[in-house]
Image (cartoon, helix red, strand yellow):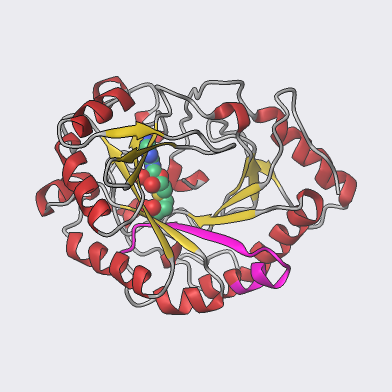
Amino acid sequence: MVTLQDKYSRGFKTLRVSLLSTCNLGCIYCTMGSEDEVIYDHRPQTPAASFIKTIAALHSQLNLKTIRLTGGEPLLYRELEEVIAGIKAFGIDDIRMTSNAFLLERNAVKLKQVGLRSVNVSLDAMDEDSFFRMTRRKQLQRTLKGIEAAINAGLEVKINAVIMRDQNHDQVLPLLDYALKHNMPIRFLEVMAMGHLYGNTEKHLFTQQDILDTIATKYNFMRLPRKPSATANYWQTEQSGIFGIIGNESEPFCQDCNRLRLDAEGNIYGCLSNNNPIALSGNENDDELTDKLQQAMQQKQSLHFVGSELSMMHIGG
Ligand code: SAM
């Protein structure tokens, strides 16, 4: 095992795996909306065995604590259960997923049984028109049913809501009301300069302060201490509900980032804002793998997110 650290003492303890680069929603911050980005993709998917082999090799060097499965939409990945079971088999218990929940209703119980611990569900609106404006799909009810199924299956559920000025900023309070009612933590995300929004976020940015000001019209709250390596800052309402803000622009969280990313083509990235893939062949010996991990570590930006032309749908959100 290697101790890999950069000058800010950052290591890699969380691996985010993008299982595939396609999705069944067309969220406006993630895609340009062309159908080939957002419909069922019949191209061959990377086999589960290949993901498991790569994750095992990375784990042997890094002693990973958490694996987050994402995409694209991970529920479109046909061998999702096999990947989860495979990861669990080599001793990592903290297996999480980020999903739009579109297919969660029929999968939640099986995923829990094979070892999934939690799911972060992307939900950007509480009314059909806003949901359609954000995702290009009229599927709010289906998403809500997916969330309900996940809760009933015993999965920990958090909500992620990207807030864009003049698109869904009027949804902050309805989303918070919904999350508080179901006792689920919710995190609001400032829009990030990724993919087609690279260099073009200013007019969409609804800042951490804007979100707090909106919430303050209805709730009293106090700030909680930040946990190490967390992406979100958290607040607690007077009624003991928790909400968070991933204020990438207002309060970047790069200083203790511990995340490594693996995409569906077997490339690793040390930073969300680096679009230079480091290809893994799957046959590296220990020294070669260490060398590639060191390259990935050097990709980490210093303390502020600069963005990337790569969409989150590819690198994995
Ligand atoms: N399909 C899954 C989902 O919808 O959760 C997983 C992949 S999606 C790329 C993961 C996360 O990335 C979502 O929470 C989404 O909201 C976020 N995301 C994608 N592009 C973003 C951007 N430009 N700014 C902020 N968040 C973004």
Assess whether residue 94 is covered by the magenta stretch.
yes
Q: Please indicate, yes or no, whether residue 130 appears anywhere in the rendered image.
A: yes
The quarter holding residue 228 reads top right
Assess whether residue 303 is covered by the magenta stretch.
no
* Image: 261 above or below 20: above
Considering depth in this image, is 217 or 1 the residue closer to the camera? 217
Q: Which residues are magenta?
A: 85-102
Q: Please indicate, yes or no, whether residue 104 appears anywhere in the rendered image.
A: no
Q: Is residue 99 left or right of residue 253?
A: left
Image x and y of residue 249, in percent = 41, 23
Q: Residue furthest front?
A: 238
Point 42% across, 72% down: residue? 154
Considering depth in this image, is 135 or 4 the residue closer to the camera? 4
Image x and y of residue 111, in percent = 48, 74
Image x and y of residue 298, in percent = 71, 28
Q: Is residue 316 left or right of residue 244?
A: right
Q: Is residue 44 left or right of residue 295?
A: left
The quarter holding residue 17 reads bottom right
Point 77% across, 32% down: residue? 5
Image x and y of residue 156, in percent = 43, 62
Location of ligand 1 given as a quarter of the image: top left
Q: Is residue 193 left or right of residue 220?
A: right
Q: How many marks?
A: 0
Point 31% across, 57% down: residue? 183
